[in-house]
């Protein structure tokens, strides 16, 4: 990247884009319209209240901003995309781009529309408001590309319901920082807000409020389309067999009955893996879900399964013996979870087969791998436990599976003061793996779990702390000095604030020009 102290002046009223792409491209047209507005947001501390300031020429520009070398007025920029316009972002989408602004050319180039969208975001950060709605841009030469192809943010909408409007604000923030996967943790023990057509009782019984705290198909399509226009994939998670108590509010027959002294005690545990009807239910539900969500991956969960209820249920034990998961004469240990880890493997393999039959692939939490499950080669392992995560990455990649890392990027865990440095210094390649193993780490994901997060603090708690994760996953490994990142993060924090997002301060005391409007 080369940026020097020679500038073009830009008149917002006399600036346009020239786009070249094979065929029509609604995604690019919408991105251009969106970013033209973002290019020229007024600096709220410098706006003339009477609206009398006019666009300045080179002479008045030099009078306003001393010691800057102006080289004329930039009236247009060409966007050249060499491939046909795509319709859906995917795991292998090309996001590389270049920007050249000089005497000879003003050009954004990318092979794909996704790279062009990323370039427009960078361009919007290069343009500077120098006062009274006056804009300049440096001479620039940039060749940019992401280090990892999976750069995600998990938002939990089960512990607290998050409105579609707030989700769209989060998608805006992701786009401003070049994250490209929204991991939608939609369901959990507390609620299931998804309005199913095939199983309508799920939300009628399982949502906090079946009229207000829900996501209809129209809501979901709105989120998916909003994300797509910003080059963001939406990966739905339906976590099973644990974290499913909300399912049982409507369909208790899906759940495992817990026993005490050989009798049901009125409590329920994870989904019952011994019933074929459980798998029939999942297949029908997943088919409906995957008809809505276009991404090639679905996150099927598999974490934190409490085996005690399975252990107590005699029907489960009989099933395990019938399927040779345990020997017919074997006693069931009251302490060991080995047998029940095998039962979970049995369950997960059947669910993965269902996903494969629907022409999709699966992401699972790391427990599935830790329990030595034999998975399909294209299964992605999501590493989330903090202890020994480097060893976990080594073991998973040695086994040949692709990996997503979240262990050190739990943004919902807050502390007083500047706490983003610990996120910034987390390096996915900080384990002694081979080049082949490194190639299997496809990226990472910040998480914002919802026990203490709702629509009122989602943006503030996530940003600008999420900048540390976004930069780590996009930029080179060598860009790792948190001290030098301070200035970039301060500027981005203020820019996001100017764009209407109520983000928190990133580095303690200070101010943004728009603070007094919040």
Image (cartoon, rainbow, N blue to C red):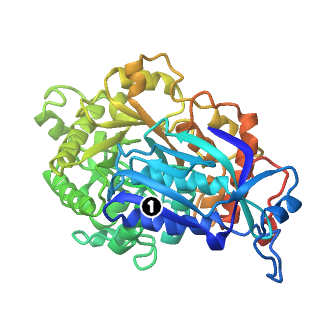
Note whether 21 is above or below 374 in the view shown. below
Answer with the quarter of the image where residue 211 lies.
bottom left
Residue 381 shows in this picture: yes
| Residue 70 image offset from top left, x and y in percent | 76, 54
Which residue was labeled with disc 1?
19
Q: Nearer the viewer, residue 198 or 335?
A: 198
| Residue 262 image offset from top left, x and y in percent | 26, 45
How many marks do you count on the picture? Answer: 1
Instruction: Tell me the residue at 57%/63% (across/down).
Output: 454
Q: Nearer the viewer, residue 256 or 94?
A: 94
Note whether 332 is above or below 18 in the view shown. above
Apparent side of residue 50 relative to residue 322 in the rendered image (left or right): right
Instruction: Tell me the residue at 30%/39% (across/down).
Output: 311
SS label for mark 1:
strand
Answer with the quarter of the image where residue 349 lies.
top left
| Residue 310 image offset from top left, x and y in percent | 29, 42
């Amino acid at each position: 990247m080369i940026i020097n102290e020679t500038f073009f002046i830009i008149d917002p009223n006399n600036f346009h884009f020239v786009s070249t792409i094979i065929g029509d491209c609604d995604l690019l047209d919408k991105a251009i319209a969106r970013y033209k507005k973002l290019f020229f947001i007024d600096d709220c501390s410098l706006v003339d209240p009477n609206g009398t300031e006019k666009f300045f020429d080179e002479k008045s520009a030099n009078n306003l901003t001393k010691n800057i070398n102006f080289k004329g007025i930039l009236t247009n920029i060409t966007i050249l995309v060499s491939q046909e316009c795509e319709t859906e972002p995917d795991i292998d989408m090309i996001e590389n781009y270049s920007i050249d602004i000089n005497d000879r050319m003003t050009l954004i180039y990318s092979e794909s529309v996704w790279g062009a969208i990323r370039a427009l975001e960078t361009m919007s950060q290069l343009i500077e408001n120098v006062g009274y709605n006056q804009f300049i841009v440096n001479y620039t030469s940039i060749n940019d590309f992401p280090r990892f192809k999976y750069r995600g943010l998990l938002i939990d909408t089960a512990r607290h319901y998050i409105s579609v409007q707030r989700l769209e604000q989060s998608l805006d923030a992701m786009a401003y920082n070049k994250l490209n996967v929204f991991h939608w943790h939609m369901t959990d023990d507390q609620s299931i807000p998804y309005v199913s057509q095939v199983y309508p009782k799920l939300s009628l019984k399982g949502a906090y409020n079946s009229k207000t705290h829900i996501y209809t198909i129209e809501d979901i399509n709105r989120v998916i389309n909003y994300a797509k226009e910003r080059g963001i994939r939406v990966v739905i998670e339906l976590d099973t067999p644990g974290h499913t108590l909300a399912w049982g509010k409507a369909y208790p027959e899906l759940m495992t009955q817990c026993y005490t002294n050989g009798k049901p005690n009125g409590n329920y545990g994870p989904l019952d893996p011994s019933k074929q009807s459980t798998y029939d239910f999942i297949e029908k539900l997943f088919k409906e879900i995957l008809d809505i969500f276009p991404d090639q991956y679905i996150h099927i969960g598999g974490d934190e399964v409490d085996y005690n209820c399975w252990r107590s249920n005699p029907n489960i034990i009989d099933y395990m013996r019938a399927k040779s998961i345990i020997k017919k004469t074997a006693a069931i240990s009251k302490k060991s979870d080995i047998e029940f880890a095998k039962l979970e493997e049995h369950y997960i393999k059947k669910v993965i087969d269902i996903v494969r039959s629907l022409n999709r692939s699966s992401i699972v939490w790391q427990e599935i791998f830790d329990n030595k499950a034999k998975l399909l080669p294209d299964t992605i392992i999501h590493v989330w436990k903090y202890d020994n995560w480097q060893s976990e990455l080594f073991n998973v990649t040695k086994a040949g599976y692709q990996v997503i890392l979240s262990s050190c990027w739990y943004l919902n865990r807050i502390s007083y003061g500047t706490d983003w440095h610990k996120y910034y210094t987390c390096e996915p390649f900080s384990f002694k793996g081979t080049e082949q193993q490194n190639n299997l780490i496809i990226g990472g994901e910040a998480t914002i779990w919802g026990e203490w997060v709702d629509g009122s603090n989602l943006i503030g708690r996530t940003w600008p702390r999420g900048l540390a994760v976004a930069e780590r996953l996009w930029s080179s490994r060598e860009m790792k000095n948190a001290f030098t990142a301070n200035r970039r993060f301060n500027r981005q924090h203020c820019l996001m604030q100017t764009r209407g997002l109520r983000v928190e301060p990133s580095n303690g005391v200070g101010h943004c020009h728009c603070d007094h409007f919040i």
